[in-house]
């Protein structure tokens, strides 16, 4: 990443490979431990309502959201907001962007 010559297409390909591996691993975990063993949170929902999302997450696993955890979530919220998606992420122009459907991904938005 510390280079004047960055190959955005190669970075994108590596990211797709990484995501494919991550999804394969989480699918295998779900297969072994059941659908409810993982709780999916949409990034935009986490940005919009971090405390609400944490309450849902903790409730899903039947755990109380402690005051300490809520305080930590509130403290981190501005950091997440600063990382919100931009209209043109990382300088990739619209014609090179594409939607992909990764085989084996069971989660739908």
Image (tube, helix red, strand yellow):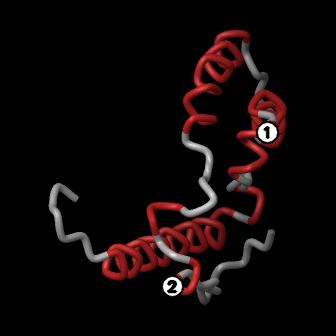
What residue does disc 1 label? 48
Q: Which mark is residue 96?
A: 2
Q: Circle 2 — which element?
A: helix
Say left or right for 8 vs 83. left
Sequence-first disc among 1 and 2: 1
Q: Circle 1 — which element?
A: helix
Placement of 40 over or under 14, stated as above or below: above
For the point 45% across and 65% down, which residue is it?
91
Q: Position of residue 70 (x, y in %)?
A: 71, 18
Q: How many marks?
A: 2
Q: Position of residue 53 (x, y in %)?
A: 79, 38
Say left or right for 19 vs 103. left
Q: CA distance from mark 1 to mark 2?
A: 28 Å
Say left or right for 93 vs 103. left
For the point 61% across and 45% down, which residue is it?
84
Q: Position of residue 101 (x, y in %)?
A: 64, 86
For the point 74% across and 72% down, which residue is it?
107
Q: Position of residue 96 (x, y in %)?
A: 51, 85
């Amino acid at each position: 990443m510390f280079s004047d010559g960055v190959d955005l297409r190669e970075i994108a390909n590596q990211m797709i490979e990484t995501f494919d591996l991550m999804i394969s691993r989480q699918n295998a975990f779900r297969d072994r431990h059941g659908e409810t063993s993982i709780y999916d949170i949409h990034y935009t929902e986490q940005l919009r309502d971090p405390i609400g999302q944490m309450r849902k997450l903790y409730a899903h696993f039947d755990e109380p959201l402690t005051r300490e955890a809520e305080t930590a979530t509130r403290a981190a919220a501005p950091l997440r907001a600063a990382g919100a998606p931009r209209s043109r992420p990382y300088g990739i122009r619209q014609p090179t962007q594409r939607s992909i459907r990764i085989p084996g991904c069971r989660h739908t938005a």
